[in-house]
Amino acid sequence: MAAILFAGAGYAGVAPDYLGLGLGPGFHPYGHAGSEASASLDLLRAARTVAGSHGRTLEPRVFVTGFSQGGQAAMALGRVLQGGKDRYLRLGALAPISGPYDLRRAEIPAALNPKSGLDQRTSVFYLSYAITTWDRLYGLYGSPSAAFKQPYAGRMEKLFDGRGDFEQISPKLPTRVSDLLTPRYRQWLLHPSGKLARAMRDADGTCDWKPQVPVRLYGASGDEQVAYSDTRSCVRALRAHGVRPQVVDFGPKARHFTTMYVGLPGALRWFGTLK
């Protein structure tokens, strides 16, 4: 959707295929900022090659946006572009939308709090996805039963094998976070240490740098899937580096996908003022 929107406005729209999604082999390292950035950079390079084969030259400046997981990925990609990872491409502006920028201090505490305003069913899905991913990347537990209550522990490996989507997986999970996690693992999520702390550090920190381009963050205080405290945390991190990002809050009545439907056209219009 985003690539079509931007391409229709005259941009070269590039939408990355993250590892393990689409036709890619293996599992998807959900929320792993490093692989999100590398996959995005790889496709930008591929797009430049394809454009060249059609006699077109893409300008080096890249305007970056993304929604939800893509918001985190947008900040991660912006950092590697500004860091000179590619000799030709350079960062033009950043406009992430409703990203989970701070799992440790914002998203996970909200997901574990039934009074936070987050939807329990989607929190169950996101937590399950993240925990199974972290185990595959970092080896967090010897058995899923260390993290998940039965009967769900026995289902996790198959549910998150990369073949199903939310509509297929969610009905096979509990509707409440309290029915998903063992008490010990819940406490570990709230007070991470060791390998779990490393996993969260690798996911977090995408706002902990100093962009030298315009930054605008979109979100909604009424978001029921990604806590708005994530956006606030990102703003604090950027300000600590001397950056003054613009912030657009769509308000308490806006839902998660509302921020995408309104935020993407907003980012498009804003990018147009920066050309």
Image: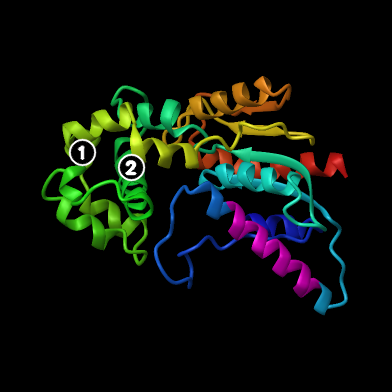
Residue at figure coordinates x 79%, y 43% from the top left: 271
State the mark number for residue 181: 1
Q: Nearer the viewer, residue 153 or 176?
A: 153
Q: Nearer the viewer, residue 98 or 133?
A: 133
Above or below residue 201? Residue 50 is below
Residue 67 at what x, y percent from top left? 57, 45
Q: Residue furthest bottom?
A: 53
From the viewer's perspective, tell me whether residue 112 is left or right of residue 80.
Answer: left
Residue 270 at what x, y percent from top left? 78, 39
State the mark number for residue 127: 2
Quadrant where the N terminus is found in the figure? bottom right
Contact between marks 2 and 1 (CB within 8 A): the answer is yes
Question: In the rendered picture of this protein, how many numbered marks are placed on residues?
Answer: 2
Among the two numbered marks 2 and 1 on one chain, the one whose residue lies closer to the N terminus: 2
State the mark number for residue 134: none
Residue range (magenta): 37-51
Residue 88 at what x, y percent from top left? 82, 58
From the viewer's perspective, tell me whether residue 78 is left or right of residue 213.
Answer: left
From the viewer's perspective, tell me whether residue 201 is left or right of residue 72.
Answer: left
Residue at figure coordinates x 68%, y 48% from the top left: 80
Q: Amino acid at mark 1?
A: Leu
- Residue 251 occupies which quadrant of the picture? top right
